[in-house]
Image (cartoon, grey):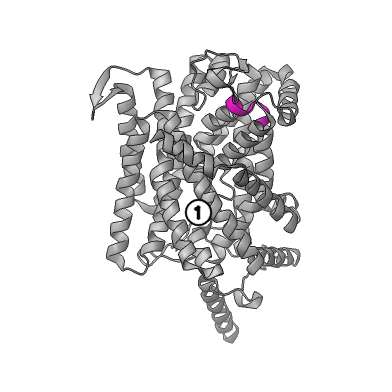
Amino acid sequence: MEGIVSALNNIIWSPALIYLCLGAGLFYSIMTRFVQLRLFKEMLRLLFRGKPDNDGISSFQALAVSLAGRVGMGNIAGVAAAIGFGGPGAVFWMWVVAFLGASTAYVESTLGQIYKERDVLTGEYRGGPAYYFERALGQKWYGILFAISSIIACGVFLPGVQANGVVNAVAQVAGEGSIVNFMGMEVGSVRLIALGIILVVLGFIIFGGIKRIANFAEYAVPFMALGYIILAVLIMFTNFSKVPEVFGMIIGDAFTAQAGFGAAIGWGVKRGVYSNEAGQGTGPHAAAAAAVDHPSQQGLVQAFSVYVDTLFVCSATAFMILSTGMYNIQGNLPDGQFIVQNVPADTAISSPSFTQMAMESVYGTFGDSFIAIAVFFFAFTTILAYYYIAEVNISYLTRFMGKGASKTGLFVVKVVIMFMVAYGALNTSGYIWGLGDVGVGLMAWLNIIGIIIIFFVAKPTLTMLKDYEAQLKAGGGTSAKRFVFDPKKFGIKNATYWEERYEKNVEENRKNDLK
């Protein structure tokens, strides 16, 4: 099985996908005139604007849910793997894919808002790639293909990566405990206890729906991210003299990587896409759930989330590891040889170990314990986000089959994701990371190709951006003038939610004028 997973990874994560991710980000950056820079101030303004309604969540809650998916094991173990296999230069390429990917995140999340609809079972807003492929392209088969792929990726492949990282971090702090036989496997009691806690809390939250997920993420995500960044900044101050050296390593190694030029780009882009998820098609699901006045608003908020994930959290991890020297670089050398070896050879690269060792070198046992706690929250909230994505796509596939089919589908995905959490937690990290890479790559291929085709067919996101900027220039967003969106005005078809909303607003205004 491990050989099959490795073979699939070699096909899916060929250089073609790496350059597709970079190329799509560059293309959208140019076409939007680098919206990720021009409207940065507007991104910040929108973060705390907008309120949840009966069927949707606020912009900030949607940001928190999407960040829950973005900020996970990729930020701690993923960055360590990028450095361990691709050298310090891989961090530079993570920055590149984040900067360019912010424009891709704007595009896909705006599409999620334009073509969202109300769930037949709950009345909540639903949207994502499956919905906009069907409505914008008129290709229902492509929407079904993405929905099935995302259910397999987010419901089966990806949760195990996060759960595995959690139990590994806990075991590194508390030890394995006594070894017990669990379902034919020799497992440490500490791992089983950690797994039990994860499953109980996970079950409580996911059976409460998007509102409960959003409420949890709204408080947990900012708390964990800010705490993590603050400790990382303190490490930078402690090793302030090494900051220029770290920058020099990252920039210099990006083009003359010790592990080889291709390794630096490949690992940087792979782990960058895995971490910030720009173009992967996961962000639009949370974006569509937000209650906003204009589709571009949530697109801008989601673009900002890519910055938070990679430029803040991933960079914090990289500086901790590189400034303390707690890493090895294996590159593509055979027989397990190292290009650089600063820590014991048996230290797992695709794990939180480098980060934990960096923290411990400055903060002692507190640092080690803090990383374990951070990994727990980072990974746990990501599992919640994965569940929500799987839930949305189950709803997409069953929305015309009646409430019974929808309820059954949602119950099955809850059980499956909890099983995969248990499976991933008790299996080896390399194998589980391989499954995660397959899931990420498959979704990225389908989504990026789809949104590029949509751009050339209709250009809805570019039209929305121009309309939003025009309204912003005319005073939109003030108490006296709200943003409005009429899809028919721009020839956008099948945006039924926004059509109904606009007609309702027109009718309400007409009645107010008569009064």
Query: What type of secondary structure mainly makes up the magenta span?
Result: helix
Q: Is residue 3 above or below residue 415?
A: above
Is 105 in front, or is 138? 138
> Percent position (x, y) of residue 203?
32, 43
Instruction: Give the amino acid type for the residue marked by disc 1 in the picture.
Output: Ala
Residue 301 at x, y = what percent? Answer: 61, 52
Q: Which residue is mark 1?
A: 286
Callout 1 crowding tier (Cα within 10 Å): few <14, some 14–19, many ≥20: many
| Vertical placement of residue 336 versus 434, above or below | above
Q: Tell me, yes or no, if residue 359 can be seen here.
A: no
Residue 88 on the magenta span: yes
In percent of the image, x 51 and y 76: which residue is there?
Answer: 500
Is 92 situated left or right of 408 in this image? Answer: right
The location of residue 445, given as percent across then percent down, is 55, 51
* Range covered by the magenta-colored residues: 83-90
Q: Is residue 342 left or right of residue 376?
A: right
Question: In this picture, is 216 found above or below 295?
Answer: above
Residue 21 locus on image (x, y percent): 63, 47
Residue 197 quadrant: top left
Q: State yes or no: residue 361 in magenta.
A: no
Q: Quadrant of residue 184?
A: top left
- Locate the C terminus by quadrant: bottom right
Secondary structure category for the residue under label 1: helix
Q: Residue at x 74, y 27 (%)?
A: 256
Q: Is residue 271 visible?
A: yes
* Image quarter in which the N terminus is found: top left
Q: Nearer the viewer, residue 395 or 466?
A: 395
Residue at 29% in and 53% down: 411
Total tally of numbered discs in the picture:
1
